[in-house]
Image (cartoon, grey):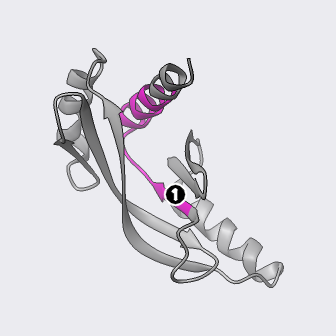
Amino acid sequence: MLKLTYTEKGFYLELLTDLLEEWLANRVLLCLRAATSIYVEPSTASFLLPTNSTCIKELKALQQDNDEILELIDSDRDCLEISLQGTWLTSTEDSEEGIFVCQLTPRAELLLSQLWQAANLEASV
């Protein structure tokens, strides 16, 4: 499962071993027990990855196994837009800060996580 946490400073991508349905159920239960508001809806999340990685070809091949959840869009010669279908969780309906989760094949999740980490490492150097 991929978890993207959106904050006012950006977003962070995590690879989790939990099953999506179990994670969602536990999150909702936690909010109910803590008397905290939660808003859950189907949604789409997108982010950019540089196209200079050799793994981009492998990711494009994996798109076929994840075609209802993963879309790859050539945005320009330097970047590839990754668009994911999943679930958005936040404390209020109109919040821009929250958590997006989705489930892909394990290989696609691992590859996206590695590509995102490599892109962020490059950007920070």
Residue 101: % across, % down:
49, 57
User: Where is residue 111, by image quadrant?
Assistant: top left
**Residue at 26% across, 46% down:** 66
Nearest the eye: 48 or 85? 48
Q: Amino acid at mark 1?
A: Leu
Query: Vertical placement of 67 versus 94: above or below?
Result: above
Nearest the eye: 21 or 49? 49
- Judging by the rendered image, the residue that carries numbered circle 1 is 20
Q: Main secondary structure of the magenta part?
A: helix
Residue 14: % across, % down:
57, 41
Nearest the eye: 92 or 36? 92
Q: Secondary structure at mark 1?
A: helix
**Residue at 21% across, 39% down:** 63
Residue 29: % across, % down:
72, 75
Q: Is residue 2 magenta?
A: no
- Horizontally, residue 64 falls left or right of residue 103, namely left
User: Where is residue 48, by image quadrant?
Assistant: top left
- Horizontally, residue 29 falls left or right of residue 113, namely right
Count of numbered marks: 1
Query: Vertical placement of 14 versus 58: above or below?
Result: below
Query: Crowding at label 1, few (<14), some or many (≥20) Cα neighbours within 10 Å?
Result: some
**Residue at 45% across, 77% down:** 41
**Residue at 60% across, 51% down:** 9
Q: Which region shows up in magenta?
A: 99-117
Nearest the eye: 89 or 33? 89
